[in-house]
Amino acid sequence: GIIPRSMEHIFEKANADYQHEYKIEVAFIQIYMEMIQDLLEPDNENIRIREDPNQGVFVSGVCWVQVTNEDECVELLKIGDKNRSTAFTKLNAHSSRSHAVLLVKIERRQATGDKPGAKDQIVDRSYVKSTLYLVDLAGSERVKKTRAVGSRLDEAKAINLSLSALGNCIHALTERRTAQHVPFRDSKLTRLLQDSLGGNAKTSLIVTIGPSVAHQSETISSLMFGSRAMKIENHPEVNQQVDYYALCMKLQAELDGRDDKVFSEEIYKTRYEGELSKLRKDNASLRERNLELEFNATSGGESHAAEKAREEEIEELKHRFQDEFARQEQDHEVLLEEVESLIEEHEKTIANLKTEKQELMAENNRVYEELDSAVSQLNEEKEDRS
């Protein structure tokens, strides 16, 4: 079936991705007589369809079960099928009396694992999330053929009404120029599938038909329904939740690292300035000695051989000092240029990082305000219900 193959594909992709961690949860509901029922927890009655600016349209109060492989999903499907509403009709001994929806919620985070130094690093808990809706629509029924009576007739009316509402929404979405309003709220089914119809989703539709000539009109109607649905244009986006705290701490750590680098360069510069000052003092001392030797040579107190030896020694020291001094001066100029370039680059980077940090802090405050507003709204709803 489609559902087991889909789950097998999901876990195959998740197990082959070693760079990310996956959290997969499953819920199973049915829409029976315009009532949403939890097939994994039948006693759960606090199920509602809500809408959030960040999450879009979602089902609240439903029982989510975390799964680790496709076998666990199949077991949950079996439990849900036992609780699903079916009945005997003239055309089908096990006719579905409700629309079944399997919800698969997937969250993907960056894997931390046992990397060296992972304990000392800030864990970035940003994640990408998505919800897969696998919908099994109950077939449209003609009372003339099914001969439904009593409660079966009421169920058939509810099924046909929700499918009609779905068809109206598809027609309104494909005729945007003439239809200004899309009646998503006319049915629980269309309300639940609002994002799947022209919203933030990728949607696939499988239409099943029968080869019997007796059901030719139903076959043509189903094909026309699928043809209209193909004209809907969706606008899928990546649903990423950013960990602003981890991102802010990461930028702060990078800023501190650049500060340490500039500080070490300043120490390096100070050391070379000290060596240059020492060379200058040695140069002054050699000049004084040179003057002293010249004075002694002119006084005639030394022999010609000693005078020549001293002159050679002075020349040798002079050339060696000049070479060393020129080399030290060249190295010092190169170092000063590098240090000044690093300081300018560091100042620009610090300014950019501070700007990013302020923007992130503002965004973080906005998210906290929205969270506080949502909590206040939830508390007010609880008080209203109580």
Image (cartoon, rainbow, N blue to C red):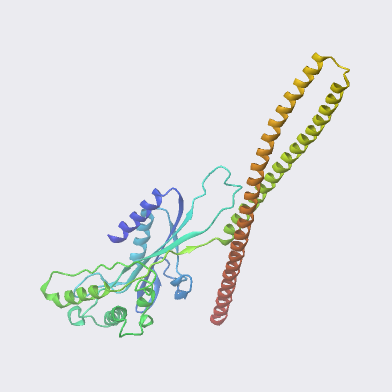
Q: Nearer the viewer, residue 372 or 180?
A: 180
The residue located at (63%, 56%) in the rendering is: 252
Q: Judge from the rendering whether residue 306 lies leftward or rightward of residue 16; answer left or right.
A: right
Q: Residue at x 40, y 52 (%)?
A: 14
Q: Residue at x 57, y 62 (%)?
A: 244
Residue 219 drawn at (x, y percent): 17, 74
Q: Is residue 316 above or below residue 330?
A: above
Numbered circles on residues, count: 0
Where's residue 232, x and y in %? 30, 74
Q: Is the residue 346 above or below the residue 48 in the image?
A: above
Q: Nearer the viewer, residue 216 or 382?
A: 216
Q: Which quadrant, please, contains the N terminus?
A: bottom left
**Quadrant of the rendered image containing residue 32:** bottom left
Depth check, front residue: 94 or 297 = 297
The quarter of the picture where the C terminus appears is bottom right
> Which quadrant of the figure has residue 298?
top right
Relative to the observer, which residue lies in front, 301 or 46?
301
Q: Is residue 305 left or right of residue 374?
A: right
Residue 367, horizontal then vertical, whole percent = 57, 69
Please give left or right for residue 217 compared with residue 59 in the image: left
Horizontal and vertical percent position of residue 313: 76, 21
Q: Residue at x 71, y 34 (%)?
A: 325
Q: In which image quadrant can residue 98 be found?
A: bottom left
